[in-house]
Amino acid sequence: MFRSAFVAAATAGACLAGSGVTSAFANPASGLAPHRAVYDLQLKDATERSGIAGMYGRMVYEFNGSPCDGYTVSFRFVTQVNTGEETRLTDQQTTTYEDLKSRSFRFLTRSFTDEKLDKEVRGTARDDKTGVSVDLTAPDARKLELAESRFPTEHMLEVIEHAKKGDRFFESRLYDGSDAGDKTLMTTSVVGKKEMPKAGDPDADKAGKFAKQAFWPVSIAYYNDTNDGDALPVYRMAFKLYENGVTRDLTMDYGEFVLTGKLAKLEMFKPQECK
């Protein structure tokens, strides 16, 4: 439930519906910057049906690697939820590895409630001639053949490429290993015109050297990839995106409740050189 679009989109991947897998978005010359971003989470809104009286937390997203050696993501999403009757701690920990050249993806997600393991999802995925072939080892060992999709880092590249071209709307299919790791998601992305940070924006001030650089406002809606005509997204994610993949000023809309994520700390890592 508390998954992030960074895992879904950067993490958070996806392919243009009906397009081929050998596209420019898989170009190894990605230009994405290794970094560690920490976000403070706050509850913005919640319906009575959500059963949430209060909620806050922290999200840590670490992106490393290179086009030659592949990219790793370490992601942690911790929240304290007050239902009015009790308070519980949720903790989602995800690590992934993605190789743009071989179009392979490896993932592990552990979800905890009050420090007790609820679920573990582990597996690998790779591109084949007809779509995405998935080997799951947890929660159950099984093999799946899913529709042609992009993986998370590919999708971030796709969003950036569309933004550079001035494309304001596009659709994609994503496989990120989320939930039980057994399905793809459809996404619709809306990219606004490039903007400069406004004076006095506290979130921009935390962006360090990027505080005065231009960004794109991006909104992505994620849907279950089914043919039943369900038009309601599973969740929506809005954020400000820099050309190197750094993001800030997050809004995560899960339908029954909405979280904001403000950049608390940004640490840039030295890029790894291809050998």
Image: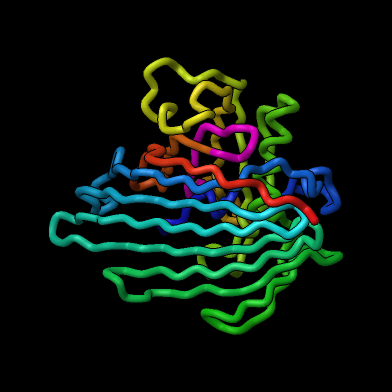
The residue drawn where x is 38% and y is 37% is 262
Q: Vertically, is 32 above or below 79? A: above
Q: Vertically, is 156 above or below 194? A: below
The residue drawn where x is 52% and y is 38% is 247
Which image quadrant is residue 219 in? Answer: top right
Q: Where residue 229 sits in the image (x, y, percent)?
A: 60, 50
Colour setup of the view = rainbow
Q: Nearer the viewer, residue 271 or 249?
A: 271
Q: Vertically, is 140 above or below 119? A: below
Q: Is residue 84 magenta?
A: no
Left or right: 125 in relation to 251: right
| Image quadrant in which the C terminus is located | bottom right
| Image quadrant in which the N terminus is located | bottom left
Report the number of discs.
0
Q: Work out whether residue 227 can be spotted.
A: no
Left or right: 97 in relation to 67: left
The residue drawn where x is 66% and y is 27% is 168
Q: Where residue 49 sits in the image (x, y, percent)?
A: 27, 51
Left or right: 144 in relation to 57: right
Q: Spot the residue most to the bottom.
A: 141
Q: Where residue 250 sits in the image (x, y, percent)?
A: 44, 38
Q: Vertically, is 256 above or below 200? A: below
Q: Spot the residue most to the top.
A: 199
The residue drawn where x is 74% and y is 45% is 16
Left or right: 21 in relation to 231: right
Provide the residue span drawn in magenta.
233-246
Q: Work out whether residue 103 can be spotted.
A: yes
Q: Where residue 235 sits in the image (x, y, percent)?
A: 47, 47
